[in-house]
Amino acid sequence: MPIPTSRPLLVDCDTGIDDAVALLYLCRTEGVDLRAVTTVAGNTSAERAARNTLQVLEVAGRTDIPVAAGAATTLRGDTLSEAAFVHGDGGLGGVSLPEPTAPLDRRHAVDLIIDTARQAGGELDILATAPLTNLALALRKEPGLPALIRHVTVMGGAVHHPGNITAVAEANIGHDPEAADAVLTADWDLTLVPLDVTMRENLTEEHRQRLLACGTPVGRLAGEALDFYFAFHEETALPFRGSACHDPLAAGIAVGEVTPKTAPRLHVTVDTADGAARGALVADTRGIHRGYSPQPGANANVVLETDGTFPDLLVDRLCQARK
Ligand code: RIB
Ligand code: CA
């Protein structure tokens, strides 16, 4: 089924198992106009994430999409940490894919973001599923960027949910808090997809077996890569073999296929102090008992509830034969 409206989309990611699944979903969803992908260090290095992205896009038959690598360090100059223990060596759960045939775009990710935004004439949507360093650098380089962007969707943060890199910080926000704060408070329309919902939309071993058995190249790749991700989640975060659906759920929301059940407009910032709460999302949820009544100065739609059905849709989509 085509998505409600088709708009140009740029994905900024750190491919990464769940980033890869999100990209496969976007490539297989009719009507998605994926214009470019940029990468940042996070789950793996920015270069490796870019190479992974080219490989994943190639499996989906999309060697035409420009892919550029970006930031390796945070805004304040710290090395962006990598997460082989979550995503495996190389970032795709140990799955080995052929060398990509498409070349890496020679531009820095920041320039590809700005160029793509200009070309789309104010219509570009951005989906960010990684530390927000590239987007923060793009805002610095082109202060007029918000006027060129229709909507930004960010997978990140934790509102009523614990963090996943510290007690309170989620990875995409917590690995570069200064960048996250700049992106969340910039003058653009923004939707935040936090752990509160991504940890509750779960892929299970039954889903993975369906992916492996369905016979499409994208289904097989997703099924194989998720094996490592499931082991990590089972050991550390979930009471069963399966995983969260972080980046794919954000993709579903970004393209309008998933309609959140609860997504109040809230004032959000990020704790950038050097203390125990560094990298925590500070979301003003004081309206919780009054249906989140309108909040002056609110700057983000924060997704707090979805209906839990996205993993089924995702698996069906990845298993659909290519037209
Ligand atoms: O916290 C979840 C996020 O961190 C996801 O984007 C995942 O890919 C990792 O980068
Ligand atoms: Ca990611």
Image (tube, grey):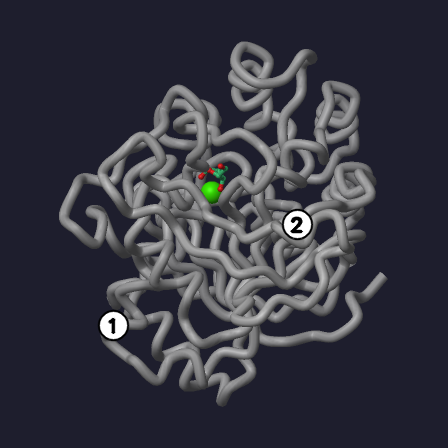
Extreme-bottom residue of the structure: 121
Q: Residue at x 51, y 66 (%)?
A: 126
The residue that mark 2 highlights is: 25
Q: CA distance from mark 1 to mark 2?
A: 31 Å
Residue 147 point in image, percent of width and height: 45, 85
> Disc 1 marks which amino acid?
Arg
Q: Residue at x 69, y 37 (%)?
A: 219
Front residue of 35/146: it is 146
- In this view, 246 is above or below 163: below
Q: Is residue 155 left or right of residue 184?
A: right
The quadrant in which the N terminus is found is bottom right
Q: Residue at x 43, y 79 (%)?
A: 146
Q: Is residue 312 left or right of residue 64?
A: right
The residue that mark 1 highlights is: 140
SS class, disc 1:
helix
If you read the primary sequence from the N terminus, does the residue marked by circle 1 or circle 2 appear first?
A: 2
Q: Is residue 309 left or right of residue 230?
A: right
Q: Residue at x 80, y 52 (%)?
A: 261
Residue 25 point in image, percent of width and height: 66, 50
